Amino acid sequence: MNSVKIVAVHIADFSNYFHDLARFKGLDFFGFYFIELCKYFLSAILIWFLIYKVFWPFTKSRRIQNKDFLFSEIAREIFFSLSHLLIAVAILIYPIKKYYLHTAIYYSTSQHGYLWFCTSFFFLILLHESFFYWSHYLLHTDFMYRSIHFVHHKSKNPSPFSSYCLHPVESFLQIIWLLPVLILIPIHFYVLSAFLGAALLVAFGGHLGVELYPRSLTQSRWGKYLGSATYHNIHHITEAHNLGLYFRFWDFWMGTDLTYTGNLPISHEALSK
């Protein structure tokens, strides 16, 4: 009977742990890491399944490169993604969610007004875009590329699993910028959540391997400034162009933009001209 009681207690503890996990209550470091792993794997697998299985008869014609994905390549991408998430939890997610009183994150909209509540999201997007472009530009200098950024560029034909495939130093660089922002600038918790969700979607969106945007959008007056799967895929091919994330305005201003207007899949010969 004692052994039955012990098993029952362990089952109850295990159940309570996941109950707290769902409510972000009393989480330890590995609880937060578990949540980030679930978000990554569920998102990547769902996107893969929808694009390359469910809707493949429709998305096949929108494939950007006419190459098959290699299992060894995907395994490498997952390995580095696991380290990226570990770093994200260690230096940003766990400290903020455990010690949010030490940041400027707030929960009541009335604290800073509805105007800042609405505009702060776009502020974060534009700030992230600028930081990403210039840090990315730095990572493409000879020393930084050979030492760090080559890890991401080993994925010549990016897949949804390559979104977080980064060298640990690059992971630190691409995460740490947000910490001083959240310490110094008041950001509503919902705005922060929306921003992190948007960043996740854009990261996956640039590594889909297929182009979901219609040409009428990407070649329109304003749509040409949007980042897309083709836009970022070209970066993986040429390595010298298309350094932005959400938008392309820094590329246009700095002369690093390379626009592809041909048919899919991409013609490498056309890009080299």
Image: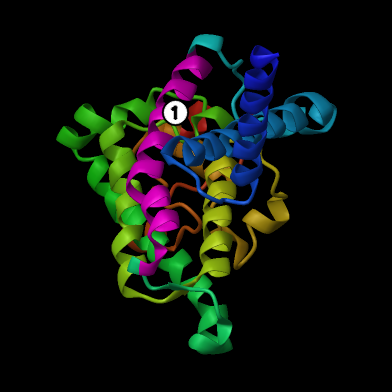
In what quadrant of the picture does the N terminus appear? top right
Q: Residue furthest front?
A: 1
- Is residue 209 depicted above or below 4 in this figure? below
Residue beneath disc 1: 82
- Tell whether 29 sits left or right of 212: left
Taking the spot 64% from the left edge, 27% from the top edge, the residue there is: 9
Q: Secondary structure at mark 1?
A: helix
- 3 or 227, which is in the foreground? 3
Q: Residues within 10 Å of mark 1 (few under 14, many from 20)?
A: some
Q: Residue furthest left?
A: 143
> Is residue 263 at least partly visible in the picture?
no
In what quadrant of the picture does the C terminus appear? top left
- 65 or 187, which is in the foreground? 187
- 264 or 121, which is in the foreground? 121
Across and down, in percent, residue 236 comes to 43, 33
Taking the spot 79% from the left edge, 24% from the top edge, the residue there is: 53
Magenta stretch: give its range: 73-101
Across and down, in percent, residue 84 comes to 39, 35
Taking the spot 45% from the left edge, 30% from the top edge, the residue there is: 81
Taking the spot 58% from the left edge, 17% from the top edge, the residue there is: 69
Across and down, in percent, residue 186 comes to 41, 76
Please name the predominant secondary structure of the magenta segment in the image.
helix
